[in-house]
Amino acid sequence: MRPIVVVHGGAGHIPSERAHGSMGGVCAAVKAGYSLLTAGGSSVDAVVEAVVNMEDNPHFNAGCGSVLTAGGQVEMDALVMDGRDLSSGAVSAVSNITNPVKLARLVMEKTSHVCLTAGGAAVFARQMGIQEVSTESLITEYSRARWKRNQEPGANPVECQMGKMGTVGAVAVDSEGNVACATSTGGILNKMEGRVGDTPCIGSGGYADNSVGAVSTTGHGEAILKVVLARHILFHMEQGRSVEEASDLGLSHMRSRVKGLGGVVTVDAKGEWSARFSSNQMAWAAACDQTLHWGLYKGEHFTEAIVQTL
Ligand code: GLY
């Protein structure tokens, strides 16, 4: 099987001054994941590596750069899933760690549970030797400024939540034909404390099953949860739809049924891939056959043969 990694940096509106950084970020993340795959790493290794890369990049709403809650705090969610046996791990409402996706992987590999939240997740992180970091180290000037703007009288919280979404995610197929997904987010701007979105919920924020494929989602979490977007797309693939058709059907169902916008990256067990979105923009990148693909706007697709070993 040819190894493939596809990543997204969040669906929504990307201000023009941030577009370059978002594109550079998704391309760097996909290269990091692909490099592991071509060196013999597993699909789980690749999706976690790609997502860590974006959590560490302040351009994205995940890890450092996460949006803030109404109270000005950082509460992050993450998910990882292994298509070989449907093992999965997730964390919700975690603070004070740099890479929630690594903690999600530890939940998958070291516990008998699927999801740990808030205080319990923090205790588990300490037990696993994960270093605690200050909230301040996760907050960028950009995220604080957006939070402040939306505290002002006259701010439109619906616009701020629906129009400027973001989450990062990855799907991969390794040379053994195993699929995996990982997704990570700071959630939605000015969310209530304790709000949990789609990202850590298997079937919504992502799903991976070797018998069908893998999906990682981004967009308005409440809408994604209502239609169980990732599993919905895989259902269409089980009915014989291509990755692209199934992704579009899932997104259009979410739009018509609950007026939700978003985006997805999808792979199937045969090694086909797609990056589709119903929002204005979504930074995405894919790597396969030593070739890098990327885009930001609808209909946009750039391709470059990667000469160096990734
Ligand atoms: N899709 C990310 C969130 O709504 O939390």
Image (cartoon, rainbow, N blue to C red):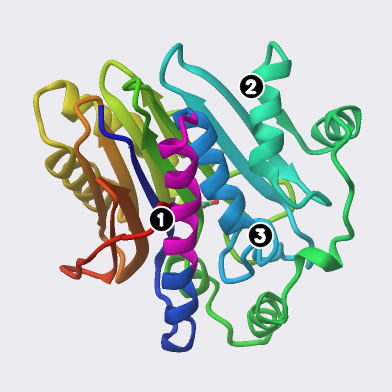
Report the amino acid beneath label 3.
Asp
Residue matched to label 1: 8
* Rendering coords of residue 36 (x, y %): 50, 40
Instruction: Determine whether 221 is above or below 179 in the image.
Output: below
> Quick one: SS at disc 1?
strand
Q: Residues within 10 Å of mark 2 (few under 14, many from 20)?
A: many
On the image, which quarter does residue 139 sit in?
bottom right
Along the horizontal axis of the image, is 245 left or right of 151? Answer: left
Q: Can I make out residue 210 in this image? A: yes
Name the N-terminal-most of marks 3 and 1.
1
Residue 164 colored in magenta in the image: no
Question: Which residue is denoted by mark 3 in the rendering?
Answer: 56
Q: CA distance from mark 2 to mark 3?
A: 21 Å
> Which label lies toward us, 3 or 1?
3
Disc nearest the viewer among 2 and 3? 3
Q: Quadrant of the N terminus?
A: top left
Q: What residue is shown with label 2?
A: 108
Q: Amino acid at mark 2?
A: Met
SS class of the residue under badge 3? Answer: loop
Q: Residue at the spot x=61%, y=66% of the render?
A: 189
Does the residue tagged 3 have its C-beta within 8 Å of any atom of ligand 1?
no
**Chain part drawn in magenta:** 25-41
Give the quarter of the image for residue 113. top right
**Can you say whether 109 is above or below 307 in the image?**
above
From the viewer's perspective, tell me whether residue 43 is left or right of residue 214. right
Residue shown at the point (49%, 31%) measured from the top left? 41
Q: Residues within 10 Å of mark 1 (few under 14, many from 20)?
A: many
- Amino acid type for the residue under numbered disc 1: His
Asked whether the residues under the numbered discs 2 and 3 touch, taking CB atoms below 8 Å apart as contact, a structural biologist would say no
Q: Main secondary structure of the magenta part?
A: helix
